[in-house]
Image: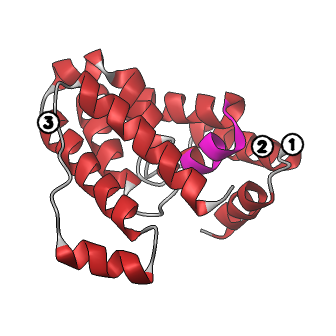
Amino acid sequence: MELGTRLARQEARLDELVRALGLEWTDPDDPRVAALGERQPHYPQYHRIGHKRQLAVRELTGKRAPVEQHYRLVVRALVADDDPSSPRWLAAVLVAAVGRRRVQESLLRAVEEGDPYQQVCAVGAWRWVQSPLDDASGERFAAARRDALTKCQDPWAREQLTAADTR
C-alpha cells in the first residue's frame, strides 16, 4: 500500500473521531509546513494528522465516558496508524480508560479479522499495550500475526508483518 493511500486512510479515521467528539480542526497557513511540503509532498498531510491526533488525545485524556462512548472510533483510528511511535498516544488513552485487556482484545480482533493494513497497524500498536509478562493473549497475538503474514498478499503489508518479528 502506497504512503499516500495509508496517510489518507489514517487522516480519514482521525477526521471521523474528531467530528464524533464535536471538535473542529482548522488548517492554519504555515509557511514552514509549505516549505517542507515542497521537499516532501506528504509532509503537510503528515503534519495535519499529528495535530488531529493530539486534538483527539487532549479531549479524551482522563475522561472515561467519552472514551467508552467513542471506543470503536478510537480503535479504528489506532489501527489506521502504521507509524512506529505515534500509536502510543491513542493506546495510552484507551488503556487508561478501559483497561489493557480490552484494548488487547480489540487489537487481536484487528489482526485476526482486519484487512492487511489494519493488521499491520494493530501489530505496531501492540507494543504500546502489551503486558510486561508473556501470557495467553501474547501467544494468541503472535499466532494471529503469523497467520496474517501467511495469508497476506500485499507486498508492503507482508514486509511490515515480517519486520514485526524482529522488533
Answer few, some or many: residues within 10 Å of disc 1's Cα (few below 14, many 20 plus, some between 14 and 19): few
For badge 3, the amino acid type reads Glu
Mark 3 is surrounded, within 10 Å at the Cα level, by few (under 14), some (14 to 19) or many (20 or more) other residues, namely some
Alpha carbon distance from label 3 to label 2 = 34 Å
Q: Main secondary structure of the magenta part?
A: helix
Q: SS of the residue at dot 3? A: helix
Residue 96: image location, x then y, percent: 24, 36
Q: Residue at x 21, y 50 (%)?
A: 54
Is residue 16 at all visible to an observer of this figure? Answer: yes
Asked whether the beta carbons under mark 1 and mark 2 sit within 8 Å of each other, the answer is: yes
Describe residue 45's horizontal placement relative to residue 32 as left or right: right
The answer to whether residue 155 is left or right of residue 41 is right
Provide residue 95's location: percent of width, then percent of height.
31, 37
Along the line of sight, which residue is nearer the eye, 112 or 137?
112
Q: Considering depth in this image, is 105 or 153 the residue closer to the camera? A: 153
From the image, tell me which residue sits under label 3.
59
Give SS at disc 1: helix
Residue 66: x and y in percent read 20, 21
Query: In the image, which is nearer the foreground, mark 1 or mark 3?
Result: 3
Residues at marks 1 and 2, CA–CA distance in whole angstroms = 5 Å
* Magenta part of the chain: 114-121
Residue 151, labelled with which disc? 1
Which is closer to the viewer, label 3 or label 2? 3
- Callout 1, which amino acid? Lys
Residue at image location 71% in from the left, 46% down from the top: 145
The x and y percentages for residue 76 are 46, 32
What's the distance in space between the residues labelled 1 and 3, CA to CA? 38 Å
User: Which residue in the protein does label 2 denote?
Assistant: 148
